[in-house]
């Protein structure tokens, strides 16, 4: 789905990403991990076309404009004056593409995210976990093939964070490519996923989650 070749990104004279290369196949479940400032958000911004790489390539099997890539944000990015269903439909509203079929799909996604009965609520009237599920539904409304999520659980309590991550995994099991940045290492033991670790803008590890967690345990015990 994505092939990243020698990607570099400089911001204000600083190298944020350096010589990043890896391949993301269709249907992948991928964690991008690393400490704050390691380059996770910038990498996702390049993948979702919010930022343009300074050099290198991102090759897509199916070329999609930025508006057709489903994105979930750590600070939710819901519009406070719109209801839940209006927020889900908003990206399509901007394009003038809200049909009866799209409205029915939005209602289906609300049900899928266990938000039935919340469609006419405003963001201030629902919980943080429900707000993030609205964000996931909105991303699926844009594109059910790929979702890119930047620290989607960072503002949630541990129980709600786990529930949200479970939703992402269920979506992956239904065929969606899911790419998630996180600083919460505890998730790595819970899902069969690929894990890419960044440090100072470089990839220092690319393994599946089981081996990644085992290597962390061995490192901590040594």
Image (spheres, rainbow, N blue to C red):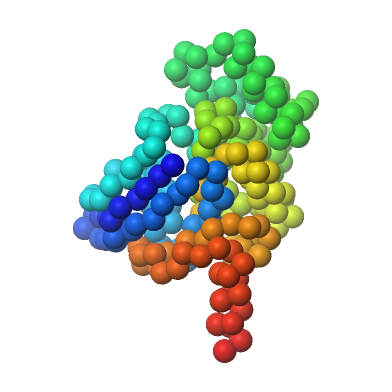
Where residue 106 appears, as percent x and y from the top left, is 64, 23
The furthest residue to the bottom: 222
The quarter of the picture where the C terminus appears is bottom right
Where residue 95 appears, as percent x and y from the top left, is 44, 17
**Residue at the image point whose x is 56% and y is 50% from the top:** 29
Looking at the rendered structure, the number of numbered marks drawn on it comes to: 0
Whether residue 195 is visible here, answered yes or no, is yes
- Please tell me whether residue 191 is drawn above or below residue 185 in the rendered image: above
The quarter of the picture where the N terminus appears is top left
- Please tell me whether residue 63 is drawn above or below residue 132 in the rendered image: above
- Please tell me whether residue 55 is drawn above or below residue 97 in the rendered image: below
Whether residue 66 is visible here, answered yes or no, is no
- Residue 16, quarter of picture: bottom left
Where residue 172 appears, as percent x and y from the top left, is 62, 43
**Residue at the image point whose x is 59% and y is 82% from the top:** 218
**Residue at the image point whose x is 42% and y is 29% from the top:** 67
**Residue at the image point whose x is 39% and y is 37% from the top:** 61
Instruction: Tell whether 121 sits left or right of 181.
Output: right
- Residue 102, quarter of picture: top right
Where residue 189 appears, as percent x and y from the top left, is 66, 65
């Amino acid at each position: 789905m994505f092939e990243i070749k020698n990607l570099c990104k400089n911001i204000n004279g600083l190298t944020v990403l350096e010589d990043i290369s890896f391949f993301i196949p269709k249907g992948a479940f991928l964690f991008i991990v690393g400490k704050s400032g390691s380059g996770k958000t910038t990498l996702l911004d390049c993948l979702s076309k919010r930022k343009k790489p300074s050099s290198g390539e991102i090759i897509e099997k199916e070329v999609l404009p930025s508006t057709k890539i489903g994105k979930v944000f750590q600070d939710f990015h819901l519009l406070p004056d719109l209801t839940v269903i209006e927020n889900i439909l908003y990206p399509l509203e901007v394009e003038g593409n809200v049909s009866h079929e799209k409205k029915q799909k939005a209602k289906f996604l609300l049900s899928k995210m266990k938000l039935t009965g919340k469609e006419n609520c405003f963001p201030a009237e629902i919980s943080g976990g429900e707000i993030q599920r609205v964000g996931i539904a909105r991303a699926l409304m844009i594109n059910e093939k790929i979702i890119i999520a930047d620290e989607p659980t960072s503002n949630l309590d541990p129980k709600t964070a786990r529930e949200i991550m479970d939703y992402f995994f269920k979506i992956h099991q239904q065929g969606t490519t899911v790419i998630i940045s996180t600083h919460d290492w505890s998730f790595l033991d819970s899902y069969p996923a690929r894990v890419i670790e960044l440090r100072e803008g470089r990839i220092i590890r690319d393994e599946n989650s089981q081996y990644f967690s085992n290597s962390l345990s061995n490192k901590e015990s040594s």
